């Protein structure tokens, strides 16, 4: 998958793991940041948990960190813009 935004190669991610940053924590930060912009409000705890469950499942299946976070991003976009494709 290609980055969703052309912001100097950073893609859709606000933060990335590394340098002492935990992979799951950075996934959560990215998904909550994008979710807050998509919904124009902070994500509710259950919304965040649902997106992280998608991330966790993807990682358990061996998907990369980027692909696992992108799965959550695609789910966010489908919530904001329903009827745009098949479920994640």
Image (cartoon, rainbow, N blue to C red):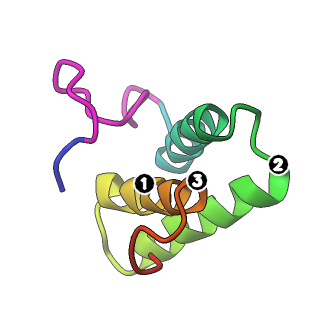
Q: Is residue 77 magenta?
A: no
Corner quadrant of residue 86: bottom left
- In terms of secondary structure, where does tag 3 sit? helix
Residue 36, above or below 60: above
Q: CA distance from mark 2 to mark 1?
A: 18 Å
**Residue 16 lies in the magenta-colored region:** yes
Q: Which quarter shows the N terminus?
A: bottom left
What SS does tag 2 mark? Answer: loop
- Residue 18 position within the rendered picture, expressed as x and y whole percent measured from the top left: 37, 33
**What mark, if any, has residue 80 been given in the picture?**
3
| Residue found 34% across the figure and 36% down from its top | 12
At 75% from the left and 43% from the top, the residue drawn is 43
Determine crowd level at label 3: few under 14, some 14-19, many 20+ residues with C-alpha closer than 10 A.
few
Query: Which residue carries the number 2 mark?
Result: 44
Q: Which of the marked residues, 2 or 1, is nearer the chain's N terminus?
A: 2
Label 1, residues with CA under 10 Å away: few <14, some 14-19, many ≥20:
many
Residue stretch in magenta = 4-20
On the image, the x and y values in percent for residue 37 come to 60, 31
């Amino acid at each position: 998958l290609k980055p969703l935004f052309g912001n100097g190669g950073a893609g859709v991610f606000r933060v990335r793991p590394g340098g002492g940053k935990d992979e799951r924590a950075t996934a959560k930060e990215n998904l909550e940041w994008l979710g807050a912009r998509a919904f124009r409000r902070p994500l509710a705890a259950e919304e965040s948990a649902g997106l992280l469950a998608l991330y966790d499942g993807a990682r358990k299946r061996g998907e990369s960190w980027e692909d696992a976070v992108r799965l959550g991003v695609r789910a966010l976009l489908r919530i904001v813009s329903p009827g745009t494709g098949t479920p994640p």
